Every structure is written in structure tokens, then in C-alpha cells.
Image (tube, grey):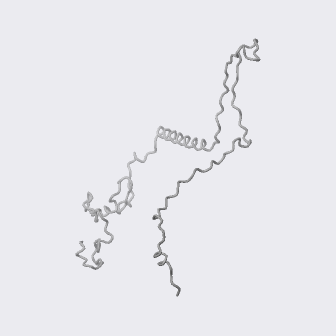
Amino acid sequence: RSLADFGDGGAFPEIHLAQYPLDMGRAVGKAVEKVVGLQVDADGRVAWDAVLKQGRAKDKLQVWTRPEDLREKWSKPEELEKPGHDLDLLNTQRTQKALELALNNKMQAGLPKRAEKKEPQFIRYTPNPDAPGYTPNCRERVIKLVEKQIEPLAPPRFKHKKVPRGPPSPPPPVHHSPPRKLTAKDQKDWKVPPC
């Protein structure tokens, strides 16, 4: 329908069509009507459910619209057989591994974090014979370097000082017209006579 069909009036409710008088509600640049083609199944019956299935992936949404869908279906005996022992064991192991992995991840997240202890370092040291306190009995010394343990309840060793703020950006300049001396005429204009 075009704008000329409506004149300057509204839509006609007795006509079952999408009507846009004065282009109100019309999507700009998009296809206005989506027409679904008539589809027929293998028996020649019209597939009225094509409207419902339109634009959907076949594996995502299953629409049951026919009476035949309500009837019970018979499967082959091979399809109804229980899985064999080997398949059952395989599925059990796969599920168990997946559950253990998920459980371990949850447990690791809940554990408290501990800092890794560093192993002590041993350093071989040969003192200078000319240094004060040198004894000729021990020409080599071994020093054990251990990381000092942190006291958890000790007060903080460093104070955080607030640094004073830097100067702000300069205010925007206010532009004035150049100053002028008042003339006698200007002074006379500003005088308002009393009532």
C-alpha cells in the first residue's frame, strides 16, 4: 500500500494487511513483508507449521504441530538395548575424570594462598687476609642466607604520606573590552530622574 491509498485518513481495520498510514511504524530500509512460501510434505499435505519454524535452526528448536507427533513411536530392538559393559566403563571413567577436575578446581580456589618458602642459600666466602679480625685458622667461610620471617601482627613499617596536589590548570581568561573614560554624556545618560 502507498500513501495515496489512505488519503489523509487512518488505516482500514476491515482489510487484513499491514497498513502504514503516513508511514507511521514502517521500518525504514528493511523488507516490510516476510512471506513464507507454501510448503507441502511427502504426503501432499500443506505444512502449516512452516510459519513457526521460519528463521529457526532445525537442531535448535523442535516444533510438534501434527497429530502424528502425539502417537507413540516404536523403535528397533537394537536402539533400545542397554549399553555394553565396555561402553559403560568408558562413560563412567570419563564422567569421573570430569568430576574430579571440577572438584579439584573448586578445592584449589577455596584453599588459603601461602607464600612459597625460599630455600636457604649457601655462599662460600674467602675473607681478605689484611682485613681486621682475620684469623688464619679459617681461610674459607660458608654463609647461610635465610629470608627473614615477617611478623604478621607487627605495625606497618612505612607511613604513606599524601603528596600535596599540583597546581590546578589556570582559569580561562575573561576578555573585557578595553577600559574607556566616562564622558559627560555617558554620565548624564546613567542618571535616572526621580519620579
User: Residue 91, position in %: x, y?
Assistant: 49, 41
Locate residue 40: give its quadrant.
bottom left
Tell me the quadrant of the picture where the N terminus can be found: bottom left
User: Residue 173, position in %: x, y?
Assistant: 49, 59
Locate residue 111: give its quadrant.
top right
Residue projecting furthest to the left: 4
Residue at 71% of width from left, 37% of height from top? 150
Residue 107 located left or right of residue 87: right
Residue projecting furthest to the front: 184
Locate residue 36: give its quadrant.
bottom left
95 or 126, nearer to the observer: 126
Residue projecting furthest to the top: 136
71 or 177, nearer to the observer: 177
Task: Please determine whether, in this image, residue 116 is positioned above or below residue 55.
Answer: above
11 or 42, nearer to the observer: 11
Residue at 35% of width from left, 62% of height from top? 65
20 or 184, nearer to the observer: 184
Task: Please determine whether, in this image, residue 33 is positioned above or below residue 11.
Answer: above
Residue 84 located left or right of residue 128: left
User: Residue 26, position in %: x, y?
Assistant: 31, 68
Task: Please determine whether, in this image, residue 77 is positioned above or below residue 5.
Answer: above
User: Residue 131, position in %: x, y?
Assistant: 73, 17
Residue 117 located left or right of residue 190: right
Disc tally is 0
Task: Please determine whether, in this image, residue 193 is positioned above or below residue 112.
Answer: below
